[in-house]
Amino acid sequence: MKLLSLLDPLAMFVDFFMGFVVVFFAYKLYQKGKQSSPNSRIFIYSWSLAMLVLALSVFIGGSIVGMKAHAIEDSVRPWKVFLAVLAGGACSIQVFGTLNLTLKDSLIRSLLFGAWGGIFAIYVVFLLVFGYPRIKTPFIVWNTLVIIVLFVHHYVNSKTRISTAILLGIIFQSIAIMIFFAGGGDLLGILNKSITFDLLMMIGLYFYYRGIIGDKIWLPTPYISSHPA
């Protein structure tokens, strides 16, 4: 029997497991934000909030997988739309926080804040009017590309030491994006493309979390500790 036949319960278990892990990430980031400087606090709090919203979307996604065998598509679709709104909101909040970190108090940051708010509003209206939740993945891919560009821009312009964890996050999420654009079917006949994409995105998110917690994202090079040896 192929493992593909077990994908529904496997996907449900993975969703709930990832949801609890992401809640833990959100809590740890919130704790980190309380101890951080005002310059980095908005960035960290934004990612903490995004993690909470993402966790909620993951729990709903796992519940939808569990209900699929017992519910018709029409009854599940409104939940899929709500899931798409939450997932899109989470990555948009991540963009907001990363914009705040990378562009500081510049005019372009204000313009991009407005543009991103408008893009998310259009996304939500499209979901509510057309009820097409599959737009969620392209929207997440687009936002993830922007986050990657913003992180790279930050390292290039602020001359900070690139965090290994952030770099790994960029690599894993870039692979997920390449899989999305590559199309095709299941990975090695075991995991379908959707689950593979989600897992790689979550691994990337874990490394982003490690990078943010590690404090290296805003430390200039060379960094001289203010604490006595």
Image (cartoon, grey):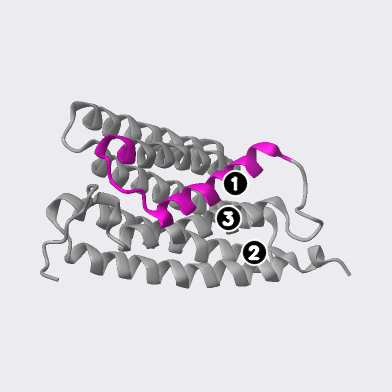
Q: Quadrant of residue 108?
A: top left
**Circle 2 is placed at which residue position?**
65
Q: With 12 as the anchor, is 142 left or right in this view?
A: left
Which stretch appears magenta? 154-183
**Circle 1 is placed at which residue position?**
175
Residue 133 visible in image: no
Instruction: Pinpoint residue 86: horizontal percent, then vertical percent.
Output: 44, 52
- Circle 1 packing at 10 Å, graded few (<14), some (14-19), many (20+), is some
Mark 1 or mark 3: whose residue is earlier in sequence: 1
Question: Disc number at residue 73?
Answer: none
Mark 2 or mark 1: whose residue is earlier in sequence: 2
Q: Is residue 109 above or below residue 194?
A: above
- Label the magenta part by its dominant secondary structure: helix
Q: With 173 as the anchor, is 152 left or right in this view?
A: left
Q: Mark 2 near mark 3, Cβ–Cβ under 8 Å?
A: no
Q: With 207 as the anchor, is 36 left or right in this view?
A: left
Tag nearer the camera, 2 or 3: 3
Q: Residue at x 16, y 35 (%)?
A: 105
Question: Disc number at residue 200?
Answer: 3
Q: Is residue 111 rendered magenta in the image?
A: no
Mark 2 or mark 3: whose residue is earlier in sequence: 2
